[in-house]
Image (spheres, rainbow, N blue to C red):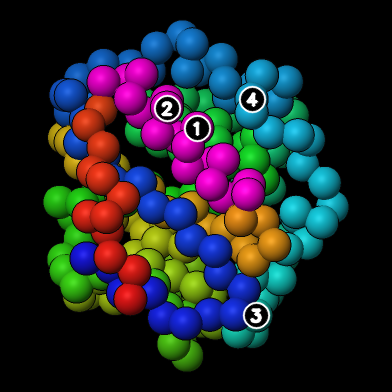
Amino acid sequence: MLHVDAHPLLALGLVHATHPTALGAEASPAWLVALLAADAPSPFEPIDSLTRAAVRDLLRHAGYKPTGRGKPASEYLARAASEGSLRTINSAVDAANAVSLHSGLPLSVVDIERVREPLSVSVAKAGAAYVFNAAGQSIDIEGLLCLHDADGPCANAVKDSQRSKTRAETRRTLTVIWGARGLETRVHAARAWLEELLLRLGAELAPAHDTKLA
């Protein structure tokens, strides 16, 4: 169950998957790692300036500034891929990163066992921040659309929180596609391709009607 606050620019995509084994049990297969290359084949046309602008407008709508280290995760992936430094993490995250890289849409991957219901999507409040890596670095997320659980914000289109990220033991994931109005066709294609990749990896997917948008 996921409540989504009304938002004039948001076009959200969600994929809930149960993986055949813990994500740390096996490395990503070669065919998936190959999709992390900037020139890998994908279902998408090249990312244009209108797509990038729509994503940035979504993030800045409530006052957040998506620049510098706070830019959309999809832009970070594009740069890393162009430099040959985009590395494999685990199959769930690699699949999401491949979709994000080629669609131009930011994606979040959350370990369902590490968050507490209720879940919601809303703009982070004034002063909000969280730790986003194992080194303890934090990001200020005031004004940024975030996935929230009972303990507060835990993921967004820039950097996901350390407390909700996947780990070696992860078996169940929720992937959030942070799409913008006007990019609905791209959001649907991103969800469809992610589902295809996850099914190829042996994951079981929850039916779309199991996720309620309120």
Mark 3 Cα-neighbour bin, 10 Å: few <14, some 14–19, many ≥20: some
Q: Which mark is residue 4?
A: none
* Viewer-side residue, 11 vs 167: 11
- The residue beneath circle 4 is 42
Q: What whole-number distance in Å separates the C-alpha atoms at marks 2 and 3?
A: 32 Å
Earlier in the chain: of badge 2 and badge 4, it is 4
Earlier in the chain: of badge 4 and badge 1, it is 4
Is 95 placed left or right of 17 in the picture?
Answer: right
Q: Which mark is residue 61?
A: 3
Quarter of the image for residue 124 reads: bottom left
Q: Which mark is residue 196?
A: 2
Task: Please tell me whether residue 199 belongs to the stretch shown in magenta.
Answer: yes
Give the residue at x 74% y 29%: 82
* Viewer-side residue, 70 vs 189: 189
Q: Amino acid at mark 2?
A: Glu
Q: Amino acid at mark 4?
A: Ser
4 and 1 marks in contact (CB < 8 Å): yes
Mark 1 Cα-neighbour bin, 10 Å: few <14, some 14–19, many ≥20: many
**Which percent across, then down, holds residue 25?**
20, 20
2 and 1 marks in contact (CB < 8 Å): yes
Q: Nearer the viewer, mark 2 or mark 3?
A: 2
Is 77 placed left or right of 113 in the picture?
Answer: right
Q: What whole-number distance in Å separates the C-alpha atoms at marks 1 and 3?
A: 28 Å
Where is the N terminus found, in terms of image quarters? bottom left
Give the residue at x 64% y 25%: 42
Q: Amino acid at mark 3?
A: His
2 and 3 marks in contact (CB < 8 Å): no
Q: Which mark is residue 193?
A: 1
Earlier in the chain: of badge 4 and badge 3, it is 4
